[in-house]
Image (spheres, rainbow, N blue to C red):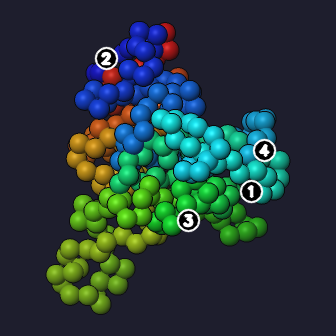
Amino acid sequence: MGASVPTGAVRPEGVWHPDGPDLVVEADNAEFLPSLPDGAFTMVYIDPPFNTGRAQRRQSMTMVRSSDGDRIGFGGQRYETIKGALHRYDDAFGDYWAFLEPRLLEAWRVLSNDGTLYLHLDYREVHYAKVMLDVIFGRECFLNEIVWAYDFGARSRRRWPTKHDTILVYVKDPEKYHFDSAEVDREPYMAPGLVTPEKRELGKLPTDVWWHTIVSPTGREKTGYPTQKPVRLVRRMVAASSRPGDWVLDFFAGSGTLGAAAHELGRRFVCVDANAQAIEVMAGRLRSATVIRPS
């Protein structure tokens, strides 16, 4: 099992190093993310709370990176202040925006120029997040909307049962991003009789609709963490959008599925969560990682 280090024993800017170990970090991500350098990660995957319900203070302005910006932020970069127009939503969403937006700005900052963000949400918030990411990344940096469809759990008789999540995919630079379809697992054809035996044997590349069941409540993969996502689901993203040896990041790490997928594929990872239960699960699951805990 990896070493466990109290954060009090390590200066915040020294926790992560490009030649250092994989990390599991117990921390508030808003406090930890500024310690990471610009452009350090080829891929960021986050599966945040779908709506926190917290009484966060509504913010009245948005910060967007701009060469002509009126404010100076990380690494001397300039940011433009955009006021009001994108905040005309109900109170619940205003709270969620104030929670998520600064963390997405940090995700943009730590991505390399060939990097990709995967933001995993459900139908309640994804359309608002799409507008937010268009502002932060630029609409030209929107790559895909992936629909993860599953068939498990309760079924409503008063509406169409909701059996999908949405994953928004944005790239740092639409001319430079890394994507390797040859590394992606293939799927069976839905109409195998319509293709040649060679194609049927090889399988087809996935589309932007991924059919995959949830983690079985009684399966070997289950860690006991309530929002755990399947390794195979996240593995596909890691395989397509990073290379062996690249660093990947999840700062709402939960059960550590990104770390597990990264380890399988020979990528380096940082998994961050403020929940002590999540850290315990990841410490047991990601045994090669160094665990950083509050002193």
Q: Name the residue under label 4.
A: 60
Res. 281 visible in picture? no
Name the residue type under label 4.
Ser
10 Å neighbourhood of mark 2: few (<14), some, or many (≥20)? few
Q: Where is residue 22 in the image (x, y as percent from the top left)?
A: 31, 30
Q: Where is residue 257 in the image (x, y as percent from the top left)?
A: 40, 42
Name the residue type under label 3.
Arg
Mark 2: secondary structure: loop
Give how far apart the Cα atoms at labels 4 and 1 are.
9 Å
Give how far apart the Cα atoms at labels 2 and 1 are.
45 Å
Q: Which numbered disc flags the more N-terminal residue, 2 or 1?
A: 2
Choose between 191 and 21: the one closer to the eye. 21
Residue at left offset 76%, top offset 41%? 59
Marks 4 and 1 close (CB-CB < 8 Å): no
Q: Name the residue under label 3.
A: 139
Give how far apart the Cα atoms at labels 4 and 3 are.
22 Å
Please, which residue is most extreme toward the left here?
Answer: 198
Please, which residue is most extreme toward the front here?
Answer: 68
Name the residue type under label 2.
Ala
Q: Mark 1 points at which residue?
A: 86
Res. 234 visible in picture? yes
Q: Which numbered disc flags the more N-terminal residue, 4 or 3?
A: 4
Q: Mark 2 points at which residue?
A: 3
